[in-house]
């Protein structure tokens, strides 16, 4: 893999809408009132600006996540944990067959800087791509005032067990975040905590539903617990996961409330592989060889379990581990 040294180059703001255009490596990014236009030496692509920005800030905030983030069926990134591919058409059979697919690999830090430069110029006050569409403004039209708060609020590690003194996680009930409108009818009983003498202040329990119900963002998991390589994230989902996640390992979903419809396709070609409707209490494992995108008609709660074992991506890619978790366990 050839890693390209590249820096983002910004144009002057355009005189009509006020946005800059950007060049990074051989990719060019331009936006207008409704769309982003991405071009590369052999081709070009147009995507809704809302979808692009919602995927962009998540890709930055998640540090390119595990494996692939498809902004749509054509454009996206692949994480090599140190370097990142930006690709167009590489995982679309039609683009590959017409030989207009393109991919460049860059150091991770350079891609973060490039994507942040685009996000900072293209996202104005009043539009928050991490919020549900019904809870924020629109990114369409001309450039507005520059946003002053942090654009990306990626995974938030809990520094202490949630609720214990010292917990400053943004979703703790001391955070001041209100219960989301969708969960106003839910009763949040608090657990009774009875501590052995000598352990006062060290034992705690909390209502996880209350915690998730206060999330002000959607499709943006927060890390709730990490045990070695086992990462437990919870998240509050409304509307659609703007990007499509392509796994480089298994991942588990536990539906904690309401329902999510998942569209599952072959990772390399995008050919449909299945649809899953998960209702409250359902558990499913996403195999390591697919891409998936979730649709949540009403705000719902989801627990995502990720396996952060460092060499896992290569072990699945080489075929040493089978893509399904049960077979993988048998082979472990
Ligand atoms: C996923 O791709 O598995 C994913 C991403 C964001 C979420 C939930 C699931 O909020
Ligand atoms: Fe996923």
Image (cartoon, grey):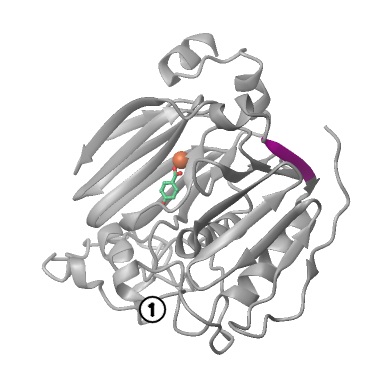
- Mark 1 secondary-structure assignment: loop
Q: Residue furthest bottom?
A: 145
Image quadrant in which the N terminus is located: top right
Viewer-nearest residue: 45 or 84: 45
Viewer-nearest residue: 206 or 42: 42
- Toward which corner of the image does residue 252 lie, by quadrant? top left
Identity of the residue drawn at 52% across and 59% down = 52
Residue 169 visible to an observer of this rendering:
yes
Number of numbered discs: 1
The secondary structure that most of the magenta stretch takes on is: strand
Instruction: Decide whether residue 102 is among the magenta residues.
Output: yes
Residue 95: % across, % down: 59, 32
How crowded pointer 1 is (Cα within 10 Å; few <14, some 14-19, many 20+) is rated as: some
Residue 19: % across, % down: 64, 78
Q: Residue furthest top?
A: 331
Q: Magenta span covers which residues?
A: 101-105
Residue 145: % across, % down: 56, 90
Instruction: Decide whether residue 172 is among the magenta residues.
Output: no
Identity of the residue drawn at 34% across and 68% down = 133
- Toward which corner of the image does residue 262 lie, by quadrant? top left
Q: Circle 1 is placed at which residue position?
A: 137
Residue 228 visible to an observer of this rendering:
no
- Decide: is 77 above or below 325: below
Image quadrant in which the C terminus is located: top right
Q: Is residue 290 left or right of residue 214?
A: right
Q: Is residue 201 left or right of residue 69?
A: left
């Amino acid at each position: 893999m050839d890693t390209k040294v590249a820096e983002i180059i910004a144009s002057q703001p355009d005189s009509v809408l006020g946005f800059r255009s950007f060049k990074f490596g051989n990719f060019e990014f331009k936006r207008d009132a409704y769309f982003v236009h991405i071009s590369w030496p052999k081709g070009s692509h147009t995507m809704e600006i809302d979808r692009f920005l919602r995927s962009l800030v998540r890709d930055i905030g998640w540090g390119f996540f595990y494996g692939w983030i498809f902004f749509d069926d054509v454009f996206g990134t692949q994480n090599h944990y140190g370097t990142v591919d930006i690709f167009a058409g590489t995982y679309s059979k039609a683009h590959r067959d017409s030989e207009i697919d393109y991919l460049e690999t860059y150091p991770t830090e350079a891609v973060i800087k490039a994507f942040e430069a685009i996000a900072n110029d293209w996202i104005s006050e009043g539009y928050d791509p991490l919020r549900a569409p019904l809870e924020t403004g629109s990114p369409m039209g001309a450039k507005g005032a520059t946003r002053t708060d942090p654009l990306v609020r990626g995974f938030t590690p809990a520094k202490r067990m949630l609720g214990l003194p010292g917990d400053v996680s943004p979703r703790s009930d001391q955070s001041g975040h209100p219960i989301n409108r969708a969960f106003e009818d839910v009763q949040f009983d608090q657990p009774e905590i009875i501590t052995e003498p000598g352990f006062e202040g060290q034992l705690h329990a909390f209502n996880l539903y209350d915690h998730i119900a206060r999330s002000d963002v959607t499709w943006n998991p927060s890390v709730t617990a990490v045990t070695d390589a086992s990462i437990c994230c919870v998240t509050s989902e409304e509307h659609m996961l703007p990007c499509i996640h392509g796994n480089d390992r298994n991942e588990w979903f536990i539906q904690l409330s309401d329902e999510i419809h998942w569209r599952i396709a072959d990772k390399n070609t995008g050919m449909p592989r299945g649809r899953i409707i998960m209702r409250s209490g359902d558990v499913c494992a996403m195999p390591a060889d697919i891409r998936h995108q979730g649709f949540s008609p009403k705000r719902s709660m989801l627990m995502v379990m990720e396996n952060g074992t460092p060499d896992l991506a290569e072990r699945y890619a080489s075929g040493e581990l089978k893509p399904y978790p049960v077979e993988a366990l048998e082979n472990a």
